[in-house]
Image (spheres, rainbow, N blue to C red):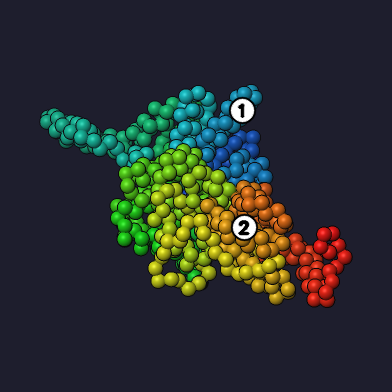
Amino acid sequence: MSILKTIHSPADLKRISPDKFPALCQEIREQIIGAVSNVGGHLASNLGVVELTVALQYLLDTPTDKIIWDTSNQSYTHKLLTGRREQFHTLRQYGGLSGFCKREESAYDTFNAGHAGTGVSAAFGMAEARDQLKQRHKVVCVVGDGAMTAGMTLEGLHHAGGLGKDFLVILNDNQMSISKNVGAISAYLSRTITGEFYGKMREETGQLLGKIPHIGSDMQKLARRAEELAKGAILPGLLFEELGFQYSGPIDGHNFEHLLPTIENVLKMKGPVLLHVITKKGLGYEPAMKNPVWFHACPPFVRSTGAPAKKAARPSYTSFAMDALVKLAREDKRVVAITAAMCEGTGLTSFEKEFPDRLYDVGIAEQHAVTFAAGLATQGLKPVVVMYATFLQRAYDQVVHDVATQNLPVVFCIDRGGLVAEDGTTHHGAFDYAYLRHVPNMVVMAPKDENELQHMMKTCLEFNGPISVRYPRGVSLGVKMDPAPQALPIGKGELLKEGTDVAIIAIGVSVWQAVEAAERLSKEGVSTAVVNGRFVKPLDHELIVDVAKQVRYVVTVEEGCKIGGFGSAVLEALSEAGVTDVKTKVLGLPDWYIEQGPQDLLRERYGLTSEGIYQSVKEFIGNAPAEKAEFMSAMQGGHLPHGDEQGS
């Protein structure tokens, strides 16, 4: 009989004998592997925290007690144990369960998170609120070792340790974040001191012990054992104890004989406590254990082999961008690339393979990445910061203060711009047009296809100032590629189609959708112009104003937020030029957080497909084609319709 099917809440879990927990964990892993193989998702990290999650839900009284999952992409077991097992097959689907914690979804989800490093600060806020309100419940934050590279995590630990309140942080140490962990803190968790002083002391101590008659050899063995213990426990503990935490561990995160009594004990301790738990990413599924990076956030796969369920028909925009970067880096040794724990996701593995000394993965530290790039730029290098749009948000101040105010030549390759599908609310790249276009000195570009993308990469590296190029998630269009990238003139758009009734002015992936809509409208008698904006900033004022003066309606299209975005820029340009005799409409993403769902479905929902653009234009112009035909007929007959006579 299934144990998991008897659990509808943590209260049911508490009625199960702990000796059945290993069997329960096996069922949970089977459920997670089965669901993710069908719909994709975060597999490796979730398989690594099954036992830890079971132990926490067994020992805590949730939802009164609070569990905060940093990043929360490892919350699948948590969902299965908190009443969502029957909906689990809808994971990451439109209208289904979120792939992250979501307060709107369950009382057991205490904090919404899709970015690493927020957990400690949020959890300590809850602990402090508990004390202010004279409450007594427990607050536990589970944070991955990869998030230890996030400055915000250290800020939260520093604050919590300094105030000394009851607060438990569990460090889930699996030696991985998304890409392989990097940096001093990660190394500190897995090795001991390696300086000259320590080495000399170790050697001299060994020699001294060896000279002790009769027991010298045994003493040397004992010293080596003590050293191993120091490597595993004492030295990592020093870091957290210096921050004001009582350190416990490390313990085996897959052994209930270790987990249950240890967690039970640390929950009784007073003050801030950090429990160090060692887990294995992908445990229980061999392909995920062998390749935890790919299975961190994977598409649907064949369960028996771990291979992708289907191969993409065409290369992705990401691959085209990074292929162009590699080619350009061969021509210019000053080009270096920087990413924040997303080497694989951003396609930089090819760059790293060819230029290992020119690739910097700074860990989950987006703010540092941008200011680090600014420092490189001051010394004549050409730094290229490659990030998802959602993660560049975290470094907004550094873009403004450290790069743009100094007009430094830092390139921002913004991956996953626009709608990103199943990762949903926290990951859609909806805001980059808006939050970059108002920054002085910043150039903001977006290509209509992969061929234009390679030219924009060239443009970026030739420009002597801050510049960004934004491209979408997903496969490319399959257009013909020019032999080599060529720099585009800054601030110059492209007139793709002339028209006299309506002008559709689009940017990025919306351009070809606009072209299809325009061709359909033209066949129905609506003469429709199409402009490929290319640049959100500087906008091609001359082209846009000239086209607008020839039509009666202007429609803008972008896969970004309408407030302050590309459409806003076009309206500002028309206002500045005194073009007031055209009607305008802005198509884009509305003023709310977009839900999860397939890209095509979301584009359809928000009117950003060719069909959606066509229907929006038709509704906007109303009877304009009929009115135009009546007017032309009247002109040919030698008279004007009533009300249109000259001077009326």
Q: Quadrant of the N terminus?
A: bottom right
Residue 130 percent across, percent down from the top left: 61, 27
For label 1, the residue is 130
In this rendered view, identify the residue nearer to me: 559 or 133. Answer: 559
Q: Amino acid at mark 1?
A: Arg
Q: Quadrant of the C terminus?
A: bottom right
Q: Is residue 43 above or below residue 403?
A: below
Labels 2 and 1: the sequence-earlier one: 1
Q: Is residue 253 above or below residue 295?
A: above
Q: CA distance from mark 2 to mark 1?
A: 58 Å
Residue 177 percent across, percent down from the top left: 44, 48
Q: What secondary structure is marked by label 1?
A: helix
In this rendered view, identify the residue nearer to me: 623 or 189. Answer: 623
For label 2, the residue is 545
Visible residue check, residue 436: yes
> What residue is at 40 percent from the left and 62 percent from the top?
324
CB under 8 Å between discs 2 and 1: no
Visible residue check, residue 39: no
Residue 37 percent across, percent down from the top left: 54, 62
